[in-house]
């Protein structure tokens, strides 16, 4: 969908994952798409260098998320929202099937 805008499919996948989860590490994206972690890491570093993403170390992992101070975030997230909303529910369930955050205490398990 957004491959032409972001340069390649891996870049699009990286940004869609961050859009969906809020923050994520390279290994999780690579696992979900069954692609090499080095490809994902390259895109994450490219977006961080462009000041679109920022990262923080959590233990041994580096977690990436959108840089809220960047003037480009609003237009980029608007594009990502359009692409995300155009993905079918079945495809979203397939791509984003892994729960990345612990369930809140007050949230019931269905």
Image (cartoon, rainbow, N blue to C red):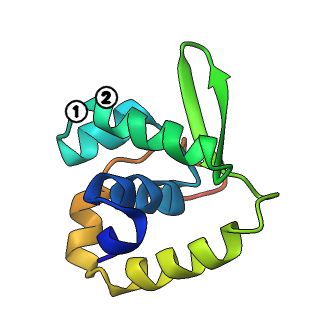
Residue visible at 51% across and 36% down? 45
Mark 2: few/some/many CA within 10 Å (<14, 14-19, 20+): few
Q: Is residue 52 left or right of residue 33?
A: right
Q: Is residue 65 left or right of residue 70?
A: left
94 to 51, vertically: above or below: below
Residue 41 picture location, percent across and down: 41, 33
Is the C-beta separation of discs 1 and 2 under 8 Å? Answer: yes
Residue 40 picture location, percent across and down: 35, 39
Residue visible at 72% across and 52% down? 67
Closer to us: 24 or 2: 2
Q: Quadrant of residue 62?
A: top right
Residue 71 picture location, percent across and down: 77, 68
The residue where tag 2 is placed is: 38
Q: Secondary structure at mark 2?
A: helix
The residue where tag 1 is placed is: 36
Label tally: 2
Q: Secondary structure at mark 1?
A: loop
The residue sitting at the right extreme is: 69
Q: Is residue 110 left or right of residue 46?
A: left
Residue visible at 20% across and 74% down? 90
The residue sitting at the left extreme is: 34
Instruction: Give me the C-alpha separation between circle 1 and circle 2.
Output: 5 Å
């Amino acid at each position: 969908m957004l491959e032409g805008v972001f340069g390649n499919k891996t870049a699009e996948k990286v940004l869609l994952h961050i859009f969906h989860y809020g923050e994520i590490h390279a290994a999780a994206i690579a696992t979900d798409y069954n692609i090499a972690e080095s490809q994902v890491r390259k895109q994450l570093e490219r977006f961080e260098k462009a000041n679109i993403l920022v990262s923080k170390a959590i233990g041994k992992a580096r977690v990436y998320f959108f840089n809220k101070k960047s003037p480009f975030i609003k237009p980029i997230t608007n594009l990502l929202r359009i692409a995300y909303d155009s993905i079918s529910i079945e495809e979203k369930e397939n791509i984003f099937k892994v729960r990345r955050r612990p369930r809140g205490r007050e949230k019931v398990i269905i």
